[in-house]
Amino acid sequence: MSLLINHLKISINGKSLFPEVHMEITKGNIQTLMGPSGCGKSTILAAISGTLSTNFSIAGEIFLDDLPLMNLPTEERQVGILFQDDLLFPHFNVCQNLMFALPQNISKKVKLSRIFQALESAGLQGFDKRDIATLSGGQRARISMLRALLAEPKAILLDEPFSKLDAELKLSFREFVFNKIKEMNIPALLVSHDRADCYGDQYFDLQTGQFKQC
Amino acid sequence: MKKTALSILSASALTLALAACSDSPDSKDIEISQELTWDEIVDKAKGQKVYFNAWGGSETINDYISWAAERVKEDYGVEVEQVKVTETGNVVSRILAEKTAGRNEDGSVDLVWINGENFKAMKENELLAQPYTQLLPNYELVDTEGKPTTVFDFTTPVDNMEAPWGMAQLVFMFDSAKVPQAPGSITELMKFAADNPGRVTYPAPPSFHGTTFIKQALLELADDASALYQPVDESDFEMVSKPLWDFLDQLHPTMWRGGEAFTQGADEMKQLLNDGEILISLSFNPNDASNAIANQELPDTVRTYVHNSGTIGNTHFVAIPYNSSAKAGAMVFSNFLMSAEAQARKANPEVWGDPTVLAYNKLDSKGKALFDDLPIGVATLSADALGTVLREPHTSWVAALENEWQKRYLK
Amino acid sequence: MRVKSTLVLFPILCLILLLAPILLGLVSTWLPAFGYMPVIGATHFSLSYFNALFQHPAFTASVTSTLVSGIGATVLSLALAFWVIMHLYGTRSWAFLQKSLSPLLAMPHAAFAIGIALLISPSGWLLRIISPDITGFDSPPDWLILKDPKGYSLLFVLVLKETPFLILMILSALNQIKFRETFWVGSSLGYSSIRIWSRLVIPQLMPKLRLPILAVAAYSLSVVDISLIVGPSAPPTFAVLINRWFNDPDVSMRLLGSAGAVVLFLIVALVLLSILIIEQLLAKTTASNLVNGSRRSIISTLRPLAYGLNYSLSIIGIVCLAVLIIWSFTQVWRFPDALPSAYSLKYWAKSWPNLVDLSITSVTIALASTLISAIIVVGCLEFEVWAKRNGQSINHQRVLLLNYLPLLIPQIAFIFGVQVLLLWAHVEGTWFSMVWSHLIFVLPYVFLTLSGVYRGYDQRFYDVALTLSGSKWKSFYQIKLPMLLKPLLYSTAIGCSVSLAQYLPTLFAGAGRFSTVTTETVNLASGSDRRVMAVYALWQFAIPLIIFALAIGLPNRIFKDRVAMKS
């Protein structure tokens, strides 16, 4: 299982946003992508998830387990996303938010047990009936991550998910996210402008198109 | 992509068109002809729905129409629905628009409450069904001799194309608690207005009551009223109408709002009379004052009066448009409206108080009894006291007078 | 790239539903104006009907009163709206104003006009209260207050009705500019708040207020129902006069009416154009003044007046309501009694069965036209979202203009033509024609009230839902729609209240077979019985209020445990 970004170039009005990107992320691995704001980090993620405006022209290919993604609509790509905002649905409670991510064809009993299991794994047992507006920022962030994973994506994109949290929370949440990804054993692409987010030995510098040491 | 859009659109347009088609009536109506028998008409009428377009500004009248509708449903299985209109002119224009659009069947109007100008317009534009009142049994009871306005509608020959429904006569109302002696003529009215500045007015022509008021004034003031019964272009309009304008020129400065604003009709006048804002109001229904007192719309000291030389009277009718899809039902309903039962109820001041078109002596004993039992309103004049009924001037005078009035008094 | 092609149907449908009746209606009104109406034997094109129109004795006077009331109402209500907002924004009375705005707006024009008439006429409640003790009047004075020939009373009622609308429009425009920052910068440079408004805020607001102002002008110049109730009577305003000609028993008057409709259309077009030119001129001539450095204005001293105005708008509304309530329970109420001498439930009881019937018709038409509008509007806005993502640019200004079109063209200028077309298609007087004719005026309001919030929706919620559920439909109706439920229901309520208030479209498209609470109320306003009139006017007011209460209450109930959905 891997996410392959094959000689990807994105341009608008004939102007390239960044040098060619080429990388393969294997399962259980987290590749960090860094660059200053405005250099097109989020654009890459949008291209992978299929939410990019067609104003941009894309060259190159993206494969998820040898499946070409480029011509698939977002809903069929099986790629999860986590944004810096938790984007929890305000009209649902915690349980409903998580339930929405689960596939339709499993019984309610199974769904609930998976939700409870997930909440417990995040230290949030007993939070299922809570209104999301009553949760703290850290709790919301964790639920958002749980929700993304319950949909059983084959890859996950992380769009600066730690940037809005304060320093202490950031550390624990980062650990939480990284552990979860290892657990799920899926490839992850992390976009950030904070060196501390760097995972593993090297990060990809979008400005130069080079891998660099963390 | 575009192609799909268009095909879906045209498909929905087709559905709409089909829906419109299925709207047309399933049962066929009758053709009106001299050979029709009453039984055939009644038979065909059963189950028909009649859209009766009638002025709906009075709850009293609407209630009466509901009652009549219920009665014909019971007796004949005809369903009548009152379409309440603000102005009968609207109905005429709608039927005309239907003719314009080639909708010669299944018209939206099956029966219309009408008279005067509107009838003339419909007759001239061939918007009326074939003559039919002679086929209705109750038409025999109509007082065509004693009430010539039942055969000449504002000088237009009725020719059996509308069924007489009720009688109207211009009457005036005053509050006897405030006015000891009502003026007996149009010239006395002017004196009265001068003595009571700001307390007299009349509705602005071309509203129905306003036009009637200036016709009444001219009939009283003209040197030779017979000219008014000829088409206006056959007489010297300027000369004949001069006394009217002289009169109004004098009257207006003494009037309500200094003659700068006018009321819209008799209903507004009634309100103003009730408030004491004006001292004299007018109506085309001799029972109006009694009704209004019973309904507490006017103080119980209000009384009715007419001018000594008589006032204008006319008849109102119901007529069937040429493109009605329920002519049989409309005929059955017209016939019922002319029955002794319906006419006596209508004449009852506690119900409506609209004078009958029937001849008392043509009624059977049961019918006579119905009329004998009618209460007489406190402010209603007897047939005697109502005095002479003046006929409406020739219809062509209406537009001429209205036009001249607007030219002179709209600033 | 896969394309969601079906969404494009919505803008197409919207275009057809709005433009077709207006354009075709205009054409089939214009042909008779130039003498072409074959059915009544008019087949020769000529200008004689325009001649006849200009010669008509009522023409000059009715155009004069139309211009006085129409232009006067536009200018005054705009001035008042700015006046109130400038002085009260951020003060304690502001909260009060915001609360009172919605009920004022929901009050139907006809009911409001009837209430005002019962209040301020020489036999109205105000004089009844102070007579005869203070005034010495035993009978109503002969004062030319209502229905004056120049249309000042009509102007007054229009101002009361349009000011709240413009206040609302200014508020929504304020949300689109950086008002707070502008104000901050302005005050830090030492400018008084009035100067900040006139120099910094209003110039930014004007482009956004242009269409609402033009709509107010077009409406005020061509209104029929209010004008029938409080407008001049001899002659009436031009729109009423044209309406009368369209309904004259003499069929040739249709031609005159059509010529009138064309002229009214041109008059309105001319006035709208002048407003645009004047706005440009003002902007140019004041441009240098804007930076002349003056920091204080004499107007600042007049602040108390604005407070008074704020409250009097609401007080007039409340007193209007009160006088309607009293009259509806009256048996006898003679001048100069301050209150009725006898009360009765009779008129409610008597009117009730009819009111129920009328309400069913009115609400059915309102709901049908509003729901269809809402579906089309949501479809169009979804198309925008799709188009944006697919690299197509949507000209928002053009979309806005299309939606404003039905509000800028006088109803009477094309409704006769629409009637002819409906007749031709044999659909006159059907539910279909009723709903469509209302839709023309409902859809723009649904669009205008919904589009801002809808465009502002954070589409990432939908994207996340897509990745989670793998279903577009689920993401749309389980996530996006519920999150937008509140604004959706609010627009629906606005749409319903617009439909409920329609007068001319109901008359012309309904073939008289459809009576609504509004047509009946306007009818009764010309009757003699104030008690029945008050019952109907109150009910006309009550229905939209109930709908608004539902639209606001329902989401709060559904989301009673969801704090974030309440703000």
Image (spheres, rainbow, N blue to C red):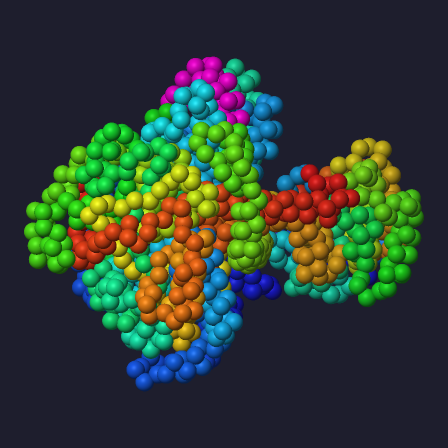
Left or right of residue C188, residue B205 in this image = left
Q: Nearer the viewer, residue B195 or B358?
A: B358
For the point 28% across and 72% down, the residue is: B160
Left or right of residue B402, residue C273 in this image = right
Question: In the image, is residue C78 above or below residue A55?
Answer: above
Left or right of residue C444, residue C274 in this image = left
The reply to whether residue C306 is visible in this rendering is yes
Q: Which residues are magenta?
A: C288-312
Is C513 colored magenta in this rendering?
no
The reply to whether residue C373 is visible in this rendering is no
> Quadrant of the rendered structure where residue B111 is?
bottom left
For the point 25% across and 64% down, the residue is: B146
Task: State the quadrant of the C terminus of chain B.
Answer: top left
Whole-percent x and y of residue A173? 84, 41
Whole-percent x and y of residue B47? 49, 76
For the point 78% across and 40% down, the residue is: A133
Q: Nearer the viewer, residue B399 or C309?
A: B399
Question: In the image, is residue B22 above or below residue C516?
Answer: below
Is C298 colored magenta in this rendering?
yes
Q: Nearer the viewer, residue B311 or A55?
A: B311
Q: Nearer the viewer, residue A104 or A6?
A: A104
Main SS class of the magenta portion in the image: helix
Whole-percent x and y of residue B236? 7, 51
Question: In the image, is residue B239 above or below residue B190?
Answer: below
Instruction: Please state the total of marks drawn on the protein image.
Output: 0
Whole-percent x and y of residue B184? 23, 41
For the point 37% across and 83% down, the residue is: B37
Left or right of residue B5, residue C489 in this image = right
Question: In the image, is residue B292 above or below residue C249?
Answer: above
